[in-house]
Amino acid sequence: MQPINHVHGRAIPFGRKNVDTDVIIPAHWLKTITREGLGRGAFEAVRKEPGNVFEDAEYAGAPILIAGDNFGCGSSREHAAWALLDMGVTCVVAPSFSDIFSGNAFKNGILAVVLPQEAIDRLMEVAKTDPIDVDLDTQTVTTPFQDRFTFDVDPFRKHCLLNGLDEVGLTLAQADAIAAHEKRADAELPFLSHAAAA
């Protein structure tokens, strides 16, 4: 997982409310055995709408998505986070998120920022013409027009995102402690290690 500190660039001014995971990545894309290429299926139905922001070349490769209330509701498919990452999105800003989507986003290295609707409305306007900056370290979202919005983030999630630690990374970070425990267990309870080996 790539560490996140600053996310800077154009933001896709989507803003739609109650976008469920089937809209983010339709079910027929779930047959894949790899995460690569899921970005092509992201927001497939929305991309068919005339004038949608996802087909606007101005937002191609934008690392930030501005969404509406209750983003990521519906089923718990982790493919939604994978699809967003594959299309280059590493930060989603919305008034609220589904708990499951928020957890999946965090586990895959996407920063989910919660801001009040007034801030979302302002960012939607700025995103049409200018870049936005999201700073995880200072927990702020800023614009070139001196807008500054602060957001809360769980300290554990912040630590993991800043250091690029997924669940495997967190476990590997404890490798020395795990090895010491195993060595101590072998010395104190040798019959357990022999039974396991048999």
Image (cartoon, rainbow, N blue to C red):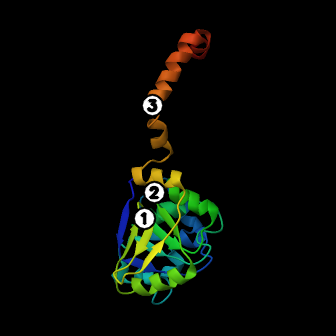
Note whether 29 is above or below 1 in the view shown. Answer: below
Asked whether the beta carbons under mark 1 and mark 3 sit within 8 Å of each other, the answer is: no
The quadrant in which the C terminus is found is top right
Dot label at residue 175: 3
Q: Nearer the viewer, residue 47 or 21?
A: 21
Dot label at residue 90: 1
Residue 180 point in image, percent of width and height = 48, 22
Q: Nearer the viewer, residue 137 or 69?
A: 137
Amino acid carrying mark 3 in the image: Ala
Note whether 160 is above or below 56 in the view shown. Answer: above
Residue 28 point in image, percent of width and height = 56, 66
Look at the image and tell me whether residue 124 can be seen: yes
Q: Residues within 10 Å of mark 1 (few under 14, many from 20)?
A: many
For the residues labelled 3 and 2, the Cα–Cα distance comes to 22 Å
Q: Nearer the viewer, residue 33 or 68?
A: 68
Sequence-wise, which precedes: disc 3 or disc 2? 2
Q: Which residue is mark 2?
A: 109
Instruction: Name the residue: 42% across, 63% down.
Output: 138
Judging from the image, what secondary structure is the residue with disc 1 in? loop
Dot label at residue 189: none
Judging from the image, what secondary structure is the residue with disc 3 in? helix
Q: How many marks?
A: 3
Judging from the image, what secondary structure is the residue with disc 2 in? loop
Picture quadrant where residue 127 is located: bottom left
Q: Residues within 10 Å of mark 2 (few under 14, many from 20)?
A: many
Residue 16 point in image, percent of width and height = 56, 81
